[in-house]
Image (cartoon, grey):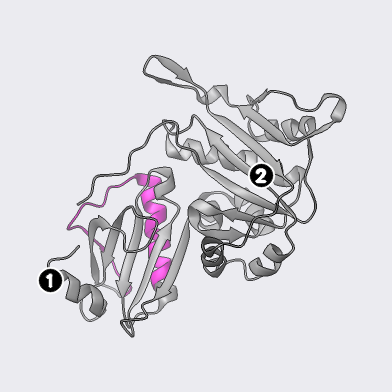
Amino acid sequence: MAEAEPAGFAQTYGVEILYETPLAIDGEELLRAVRVRRPAAQPLGDLGAGGGEVKTLGFVHPDHAVELSGAVIRPQTFLLATDAPLRLTAMMEDHLGQSWSFPDARQAFARRRSSALLTDMMTGSLDYQARIEIFEDVLAAVLQVAPALAIHWWPAGRFVDPAIWLEAYREGGADRLFAGAMNVRFYKISDSPGDMLMDTLGLAALGVRDLQCHFRDLDPSEVATLLANTGCYLFDEGDLIADGHTIEGLTPGSRWMCRHEDSILNPARIVLNVDPGPPHTAAGRADRDQGGGG
């Protein structure tokens, strides 16, 4: 099995926020909105004197400082606005196709005229739950001050409806995770009729294991629920499911075998594969496993 992905403090996490008009935000107004959720937040650089609008804004969060190699690291969040709209790339096309909770994603994307990148820095050494909480608190503040068309949540390979995400943000818990940071993707295997592949995407970007399931003759919506719920468990508890352990399947008394392995789908990462067993193991996977692959 491949080694776990490295987790250095310089790694960043981010989303792209899409707008119908060029974006410029009043820095002081955004700081006030951030401090409603993160009272200790401090501005980095110019907020726009006298209520002026700026294109780049930064905040530091000293209440979550960590010590690393003798230095104190203070997590930071940056918003960088641009008048250039996102280009429609092959990756964007795939993300639009996997945006199950946002049926109007393509229409929103077509209306884009500008975007803003919200990203963090100096956060890789933070506890992942604290890290995403800080990030989402700042995102909620940005959306309050500057309502948007869509969020391109690229670590999760999806586009998100800002109104739906804000509602889930207020609900908290699993709803918040399901609405943004974790996506369940679905693909049919073209060269193996009947085989289907589902995985979660987004957890690995936070240092948590994503999951995958290669199956046939099962209801994809039920498999999606199982993967989402298991992903939520891993987010809450950590990577506690060891190779050879089982989880409850879709029918009472069924047990699905788990094993860490290389992901079938990009991006390349180590995932927790969940195998439903015969007769629902995908033919392609059964053939591969019998041949010693994986």
Please give left or right for residue 244 compared with residue 112 in the image: left
> Whole-percent x and y of residue 137?
61, 40
Q: Quadrant of the C terminus?
A: bottom left
The residue lying furthest to the top in this view is 70
Camera-side residue: 56 or 216? 56
Above or below, 19 against 61 in this view is: below
The image quarter in which residue 246 lies: bottom left
Instruction: Quickly name the residue at label 2.
Output: 140
The image quarter in which residue 285 lies: bottom left
Please give left or right for residue 228 compared with residue 285 in the image: right
Q: Residues within 10 Å of mark 1 (few under 14, many from 20)?
A: few
Instruction: Quickly name the residue at label 1.
Output: 291
> Whole-percent x and y of residue 6?
33, 39
Instruction: Specify start and end residues of the magenta stretch as a single range.
Output: 223-250
Q: Residues within 10 Å of mark 2 (few under 14, many from 20)?
A: many
Q: CA distance from mark 2 to mark 1?
A: 49 Å
Above or below, 18 against 130 in this view is: below
- Which residue appears at 64% of the width and 26% of the height? 41
Secondary element under disc 2, as helix, strand or loop, is helix
**Type of the residue with mark 2:** Ala
Secondary element under disc 1, as helix, strand or loop, is loop
Please give left or right for residue 152 compared with residue 56 in the image: left
- Which residue appears at 64% of the width and 28% of the height? 59
Residue 237 on the magenta span: yes
> Whole-percent x and y of residue 84?
71, 50
